[in-house]
Amino acid sequence: MKSYWVESTNLTNYPKVEKDIKTDVCIIGGGITGISTAYLISKESDLDITLLEADLMGMGVTANTTAKVTSQHGLIYDFLYTSFGKESMVAYLDSNEEAIGLIEKIIEDENIECNFVKEDAYVYTCEKDNDEKIKKEVEVLKSVGFEAEYVKESPLPFEIVSAVKFKNQARFHSRKYLLSLLKVLENNNVKLYENSKVVDIKHRNDLYEIYVNECKIECKHLVLATHYPIKNFPGMYFIKMYQDSSYVIAIETEKEIFDGIYISCDTPTTSFRNVAEENGKKLLLVGGSGHKTGDTSVKIEDSYINLENYIKTIYPDAKVKYKWMAEDCVTLDKIPYIGEFSNFLPNMYVATGYKKWGMTTSHVAARIITDKILSKENPYAKIYTATRLEPIKNSKEFGNMLKQSTYSLAINKVTPPIIDFEELENDSGGVVNYNGEKLGIYKDKNGKIFAVIPYCKHLGCELSWNNLEKTWDCPCHGSRYDYKGNIITEPTTENLDIPQNK
């Protein structure tokens, strides 16, 4: 199951780290945050830059997005206004609006062909009970002079109760954008490395030592752009965030597909946008079925089925051409962590907690981190302060968030159900009791057995089996491993242990 963005582009082929390196800036993570940060630094300074990716460039969250370029992040603004005040709410809005402009400027400056299209964006509801939330969102946005509209109709092929409409938002092809930026980085002499997984970071004599492929990289400035920070201490981000999984199907239909970008504020949440294929036909991307990563109460197989059944009520002839899933980090106060990783580690920066709005927030992060490295003032840095420990003013909302996230935090480990080995069918897996010991077992289609020790190497949470993706998922912090125990998704930096002589 690969996304449309991956299937419609070529894979990269950069070398892996095979020798010790000294550099001014080391960026860990070859997704949209790492690449756009490297781009800004290389355009605005003469610093030597090294960019590391554990897998292939742009194949993580950026390859599994819906690729909406928008400052409309659900019904966020009334929450921000109530919880943090007008100044913080305006800073969040303005920073993301400027990020849209930054993306558009980069595309124009570098002559990038990535299907960038300006569109109207909508947060809509089909439930009367949510109409008041829509009205409040519009009201608070208008109070700060932003041109948000309250509408009761939309181009959607079904009736809505109401929606918040933002003009001049956009959509694009995320991997075409990144692949073009990588070419620019090559021309700007940025060192690019793939298949270079960082296994350790040390801080000595005002320099960072990054250990990868049995080599050492030394740098003054270090950027963790790894989706989820791969360093646990002293940042402690694992107790300040949880990971959420969501799913997308791309469907083809003979009926006309509408324009615009959409997300509902109802439960379950549904997202729409279209994609123009090379043959001139349009695909409709339908997203939703979200849940906490590793949630053992969720039947993963139903996630795509639910989306397909839903869209066939609108387009009975719908054919699923692509489907994919992604997970993203969500902070307890809904604001990303961007800036200094810790007060105790100078010149180390982090960007995480995008809450599924990484296309614009990545460029907010790139701008803030670049400014910090180049000793420039940034007007939006304060609201995103990664080391913040300020209390949330909206205590009711904070209580709801704690209730929502407690399941996924390390302080509340989850034990998946234990199954009998004899009950395990071919092409399925699970945690089994074997001679009084828990093992993670997957039987492939031919009955071949793959066993792992089912405890995450990040902080020891017990793993759950994802039979749809054939992965071991951590319910605490979202690390994921393939059925052989190899890392798919951080924050873990080590493969699973394999039982010996079983």
Image (cartoon, helix red, strand yellow):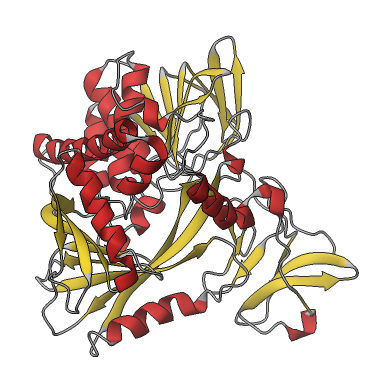
Query: Above or below — where is 206 with respect to 379?
Result: above
User: Is 53 left, or right, of 215 in this rendering?
Assistant: left
Percent coordinates x, y for residue 17 in the rendering: 48, 33
Q: Tell me what residue is drawn at x 71 percent, y 67 percent.
A: 416
Residue at the outermost top position: 205
Percent coordinates x, y for residue 252 in the rendering: 21, 79
Q: Tell me what residue is drawn at x 63 percent, y 31 percent.
A: 233
Percent coordinates x, y for residue 475 in the rendering: 62, 58
* Residue 274 appears in the figure: yes
Closer to us: 469 or 217: 469
Residue at the outermost right position: 435
Query: Above or below — where is 246 with respect to 50?
Result: below
User: Is 9 left, or right, of 149 in this rendering?
Assistant: right
User: Is 305 left, or right, of 399 in this rendering?
Assistant: left
Query: Quadrant of residue 385 in the image?
Result: top left
* Residue 193 appears in the figure: no
Residue at the outermost bottom position: 316
Query: Quadrant of residue 97 in the image?
Result: top left
Quarter holding the C terminus is bottom right
Closer to us: 278 or 307: 307
Query: Quadrant of residue 454 in the image?
Result: bottom right
Q: Tell me what residue is drawn at x 25 percent, y 45 percent.
A: 140
Query: Above or below — where is 464 with respect to 408?
Result: below
Q: Tell me what residue is drawn at x 63 percent, y 78 percent.
A: 428
Percent coordinates x, y for residue 217 in the rendering: 51, 24
Quarter holding the N terminus is bottom left
Q: How many marks?
A: 0
